Image (tube, rainbow, N blue to C red):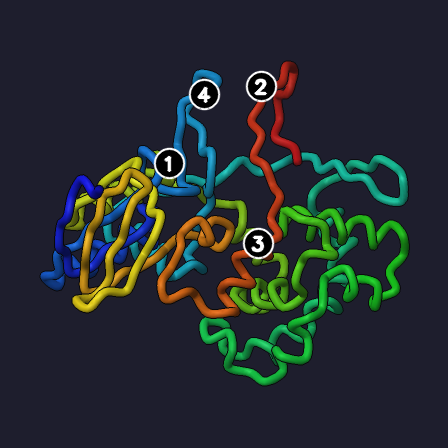
Amino acid sequence: MSKRQEQYDVIIIGAGFTGVTAARELSHKGFRTLILEARDRLGGRTWHDRRLGIDLEMGGTWVHWFQPYVWAEIGRYGLDVVPSPVPNTLYWIADGKRHEGKPDEFFLKIDGPNQRLLEPARRCFPLPYIPLSSEEIHDIDQSTLKEKLAELQLSDEEHDMMDSMWSLNFNSPLDEAGFSQALHWAALSDYNWKLMMDICSSYKLTKGTKTLIECIFNDAKTDILFSSPVKRVNKIDSGYKAITYAGDEYTAKAVINTLPVNILNSITFSPPLSAEKTMACTEKQSSKGVKFWAKIKGVTEPFA
């Protein structure tokens, strides 16, 4: 027995950046929207918390003007950014040995291998924001980064350094990292792998990523229900019905789902998702990374 039955123009599943932005845009056009969020907060991977006596980013952190849509939102709400500390020393393990040096020394050693690895990026992604615009992408889309590194015939030291850099970027072993994704990152960074690294970890919002999502949400005229995970989405004559695990029912003319593929199969859809989407949900994304914060005694200078 359902506890509620309410009618909306659009139901949005998920209160991360995609969900709250969709709610803002739709509500500004006069649509009545409802966000159903499984957690007890906004943000998804955008999670700011007070730990170890300071405010910490527990999820996504860095922003850059090469991310045009995000940067436009930062400017829209007048938010400030601050540069991350620049490491003085870089430590790495290669060829079974521990090494240390200046960051530029490390990057110089892998510049040639990265230039060779990413050489197809311009051909495969001539229009980076239209990623499927080239037929050449189909030729490499089944290749892993591990396979492509092997083709470069690198020295043991070069291979270990490249493996370290790209495993960090993918947060996964390279036999699960798609070569096409690496090329796409490079294309979105003006085909410049050094700029790609700069984009990934240089600037962050002064008061945390949460400030941006809060600005977008406060600009949206939307209803929202926290701690309301969706169990089923059914097609009905008047549109769609979303049913939560608590048994609440909400109907709308349309549903926008913003859940990531890792948890998309937690919802039963009727009619079901396409075979391709179902396969992606089963396979999940390759990332296995965990963010780890610690206080370390005796560290006085930034390092990596």
The label nearer to you, 4 versus 1, is 4
Q: Earlier in the sequence, mark 3 or mark 4?
A: 4
Using a 10 Å C-alpha cutoff, classify the residue at mark 2 as few (fewer than 14 neighbours), some (14 to 19) or many (20 or more).
Answer: few
Q: Residue 87: x and y, percent?
A: 62, 36
Quadrant into which the N terminus falls? top left
Estimate the x, y position of residue 159 in percent, counting from the top left.
83, 54
Question: What residue did someone put label 4 on?
Answer: 51
Which one is earlier in the sequence, the residue at label 3 or at label 2? Answer: 3
Counting residues from the start of the chain, the first of labels 1 and 3 encountered is 1
Nearest the eye: 267 or 119: 267
| Residue at screen point 45% across, 71% down | 129
Q: Disc 1 on helix, strand or loop?
A: loop
Q: Single out the mark in the foreground, 3 or 2.
A: 3
User: Which amino acid, by three-letter code, is at mark 2?
Assistant: Lys
Disc 3 to disc 4, C-alpha distance? 28 Å
Residue 278 relative to residue 154: left or right: left
Residue 5 appears at what percent x and percent y? Answer: 15, 48
**As displayed, is residue 158 above or below residue 45?**
below
- List the residue tagged with mark 1: 208
Identify the residue shown where x is 77% and y is 39%. 92
Q: Quadrant of residue 148?
A: bottom right
Please tell me whether mark 4 sits on a helix, a strand or a loop.
strand
Which numbered dot is residue 295? 2
Residue 57 to residue 122: above or below: above
Can residue 131 be seen here?
A: yes
Q: Which residue is mark 3?
A: 285
Give, as a three-letter code, the residue at label 1. Gly
Tell me if label 4 and label 2 are in contact, CB under 8 Å: no
| Quadrant housing the C terminus | top right
